[in-house]
Image (cartoon, helix red, strand yellow):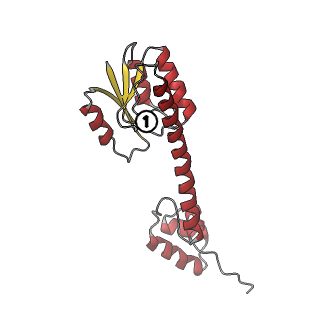
Amino acid sequence: MEIGYARVSTVKQDLSRQLDALAAAGVTTVFTDKKSGATRDRPGLHGALQHARDGDVIVVHTLDRLGRTVRDTLNLMHELEERGVGIRTLADPLRIDTSTPDSPMAQLAVVMLALFAEMERTYAAERAAHARAVATANGRRTGRPSVVDPDKLEHALMLRDKGVPMREIVTKTGLARTTLYRHLPPRPDPAR
């Protein structure tokens, strides 16, 4: 029996490309996750692993859907091999089908693809960190967009400039004290 497994890293991402490929391959039992591959704590993966029996094959779109580090991927594949469960990929440039485990080329392909997945994860993190650093250096804010109402901030600034105490500004604007300290410009130095 073939058991499908599909995963994306966040809840905002779409599984349809992987699900369509699994359906086109004739896989009818599919487990899914919307969680990072950096962890093995994934309910869909656990479901697929529990469902798999000796002689079954777990089918994934690409090998990196199983794990993002070489060690995790190889450990998982070793566990499955000991249980008599194979792995087959659909879209990797080097096709993998461990239901014939004696092939040295298949073993090489597994190691290479797992290594490429880990490298891509590392490089993606480096690219994201660099992009954040460049944005910050150019005065652009990074991260989630602010959800603070600019009218409330303007009102808070006006109240503060009139000498209204911070606790009263919090009450009148409904903004948290930490939000006000984070978003309001510093008070001018009276000694100058």
Q: Estimate the x, y position of residue 176 in percent, counting from the top left.
A: 54, 61
The answer to whether residue 149 is above or below residue 76 is below
Question: Residue 6 vs residue 81: left or right?
Answer: left
Residue 11 quadrant:
top left
Return the residue nearer the eye: 34 or 58. 58
Residue at the extreme right? 191
The answer to whether residue 92 is above or below residue 160 is above
Label 1's element?
Answer: helix
Identity of the amino acid at label 1?
Arg
The structure residue drawn at horizontal position 54% and vertical position 30%, both measured from the top left corner, is 72
Question: Residue 61 vs residue 136: left or right?
Answer: left
Residue at the extreme bottom? 192
The structure residue drawn at horizontal position 44% and vertical position 42%, both measured from the top left corner, is 9
Question: Residue 109 vs residue 165: left or right?
Answer: left
The structure residue drawn at horizontal position 55% and vertical position 50%, both measured from the top left corner, is 123
The answer to whether residue 62 is above or below residue 163 is above
Residue 27 seen from this side: yes
Q: Estimate the x, y position of residue 31 in percent, counting from the top left.
A: 35, 29
Q: Estimate the x, y position of residue 189 in percent, counting from the top left.
A: 70, 81
Quarter of the picture containing the N terminus is top left
Residue 41 seen from this side: no
